[in-house]
Image (cartoon, rainbow, N blue to C red):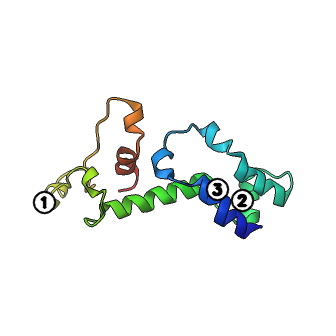
Amino acid sequence: MLCFFLTAIRLVLEYVCPAWHTSPTKQQTTSLSTHTAYCRCNTGNTPYDEACCLVKLTSLSERRDSLCSKLFSQLVSQSHILHCLLPAQRDDSLTGRLRSRNKYPTVHARTNRFKNSFIPYAIANYQ
């Protein structure tokens, strides 16, 4: 049953997660009942975090975060097709003199919707 869940159901839950990972609220992410129902089905009426540990699954939020981090590390490479979406890298001689030693400058956004989209969120959190 675990193999079926990981290969069929979990893939659907994580489909294109970098595109929507930052959009849902905390209540919406915890209400993904398929994952919680699977964990509770196998462990009884235990809390979600404990059920994930007992079933040896990572929580959906941790998994989505790791997938987004992995995608950002792929985007940083020059050979990725979406590398052009990232802002220009700072010069190494410049970053040595700045407080923030990040390769990419922060993206200033006027709206929260753009601020929470993948590229600005990834630049702020995964560098």
Residue at point 25%, 48% (across, down): 105
Query: According to the image, label 1 marks what residue?
Result: 93
Q: Classify residue 122 as left or right of residue 65.
A: left
N-terminal of the two: label 2 or label 3? 2
Query: Measured from the top left, where is residue 67 in percent x and y?
Result: 49, 59
Provide the secondary structure element on which disc 2 rests. Answer: helix
N-terminal of the two: label 3 or label 1? 3
Kind of residue at badge 1: Ser
Q: For label 3, count other residues whose C-alpha is less than 10 Å away and answer few (under 14), some (14-19) or many (20+).
A: some
Q: Classify residue 111 as left or right of residue 51.
A: left
Q: Quadrant of residue 4?
A: bottom right
Q: Are marks 2 and 3 in contact (CB under 8 Å)?
A: yes
Foreground disc of the pair 2, 1: 2
Query: Measured from the top left, where is residue 34 in percent x and y?
Result: 72, 50
Provide the secondary structure element on which disc 1 rests. Answer: helix
Q: For label 1, count other residues whose C-alpha is less than 10 Å away and answer few (under 14), some (14-19) or many (20+).
A: few
Q: For label 2, count other residues whose C-alpha is less than 10 Å away and answer few (under 14), some (14-19) or many (20+).
A: many
Kind of residue at badge 3: Ser
Q: CA distance from mark 2 to mark 3?
A: 6 Å
Query: Measured from the top left, where is residue 99 in percent x and y?
Result: 24, 50
Residue at point 70%, 53% (across, down): 35
Query: According to the image, label 3 marks what residue?
Result: 59
Provide the secondary structure element on which disc 3 rests. Answer: loop
Q: CA distance from mark 3 to mark 1?
A: 40 Å
Q: Is residue 56 above or below residue 85?
A: below
| Disc on res. 52 | 2
